[in-house]
Each structure stands twice: as C-alpha cells, then as structure tokens.
Image (cartoon, helix red, strand yellow):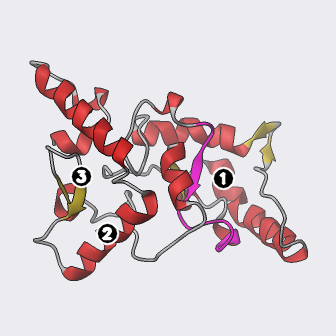
Amino acid sequence: MMRLQRPDAPLWLSENWEAWGKEYQQKRQEKPRYQFKWKIYKKVAVNHLLIPLLREMTADHCSFCDASPMISRLKETIEHFQPKSLYPLLVYQWANLFLCCYKCQGAKGEQFKHTLLKPDEMDYQFHLHFVVNFETGELSANPDNSPENQQRVKDTIALYNLNDPERLNDRICEFRKYTKISDPNVADFSYRFMFL
C-alpha cells in the first residue's frame, strides 16, 4: 500500500455527491435489497468518469495491494472504502473512492473496520506500518510501531487478504525481476513499497 496523494475532486462530483448519496440512501430505505447502480452524468456512467482519475492518482496500481497494471486486474472496480451498504451517504464521496483490483475488493467486500489504514491519510507511510519478508513475500506489522498501529496493519492485511498465497508468490517474483535489472524504474513494478 503506497501513500497516495489525492487531488481535489472533480467539480461535477463536488457539486453532486451529497445529493446522489441521499438519493441512494433513500432507495435503500425504500427497498433494502436495492442494487447499487452508478449514476449517469452527461450520458456517461460515473464510474467510467472516475476510473481514469483514480488510475492517475495511483499510477495505475491497486490502492491497497499495489498490483499493476490495473487494466488486467480492474474489471471496472472502484472500492468504497467505507462500504456503500453501511455508509450510503458516502457512496459518491471522492475521499471514499479508490482504484482497487478485484482480489482486494473481493476479499474486503462490504466489511469495514475503523482501524483500517487508508492510503491517502496524511500521516500514512508504508515503512512505518509494514515490514516485508523478502524470502516469503509476507507483509506484517512493523514491531517498532505502537500496539494500536500494529493492530491497524493486521486489520488491513486481514480485510484485504494481502497475504494470500498467490500474492506472496507474486511479490517474490516481482522482487526477483527487480533485482535482476541494473537500473530499474520502480514505477514499472507491482508492489513498489518493496523497493523504496
């Protein structure tokens, strides 16, 4: 999970997110099994307008596991950090939306803990929270951190399933590729946090 610098929300979203959230909340109150559908803005689904902006913010990496390129992992996936089923008013809030691979989103689903690390938090830095085992690819909590922050890391790893065996293998392979190149560009790799 790399630190993300979130730009300002696009004007069209700033002007509409609250009303769209209230509309979605009302539909859920009227029909609890109401299936979420992205709003259409100027004849385009809002998720199609958001994905290029979120891709730019993350340099086309998943906001949570940092896998890349997202084109093969995306499947039009935008993560609602605070899930839409629990926080319907935030369904279109810019600060709640992240580019996310299908593995991370599938693992987290509609779960949420207030302790989760958020990659665009001002004080978030990967190396202060996480430790990478370069032999196994496993992520763990930095033992030098406070017990509260260690728990945040554990919750984040668990909810996004960041230590799934397939992900561990992917990290090991990516690390090996990186170390074989004489002058690698970190941005060209998944799991950039391992190389910084």
Q: Is residue 157 or residue 59 the one in the foreground?
A: 157
Q: Local crowd at mark 2 within 10 Å, few (<14), some, or many (≥20)?
A: many
- The segment highlighted magenta reads 75-88
Which picture quadrant has residue 26?
Answer: bottom right
Dot label at residue 154: 2
Q: Local crowd at mark 3 within 10 Å, few (<14), some, or many (≥20)?
A: many
Q: Would you say 175 lies left or right of 92 here?
A: left
- Residue 83 on the magenta segment: yes
Taking the spot 77% from the left edge, 65% from the top edge, the residue there is 19
**Most frequent secondary structure within the magenta stretch:** loop
Q: Local crowd at mark 1 within 10 Å, few (<14), some, or many (≥20)?
A: some
Which picture quadrant has residue 143?
Answer: bottom left
Mark 2 touches mark 1? (CB < 8 Å) = no
The Cα atoms of the two marked residues, 3 and 1, are separated by 38 Å
**Disc 2 versus disc 1: nearer the observer:** 2
Q: Would you say 1 lies left or right of 76 here?
A: left
Q: Is residue 183 or residue 103 the one in the foreground?
A: 103
The answer to whether residue 13 is seen in the rendering is yes
Q: Is residue 53 or residue 154 the one in the foreground?
A: 154
Residue hosting label 1: 13
The Cα atoms of the two marked residues, 2 and 1, are separated by 33 Å
Residue hosting label 3: 138
Between discs 2 and 1, the one toward the N terminus: 1
Taking the spot 63% from the left edge, 39% from the top edge, the residue there is 76
Instruction: Please name the amino acid that badge 3 sits on.
Output: Glu
| Quadrant placement of the C terminus | top left
User: In the displayed image of the protein, which residue is found farthest to the bottom?
Assistant: 147
Instruction: Please name the amino acid that badge 2 sits on.
Output: Lys
Is 179 drawn above or below residue 85 in the view shown? above
- Residue 6 on the magenta segment: no
Between discs 3 and 1, the one toward the N terminus: 1
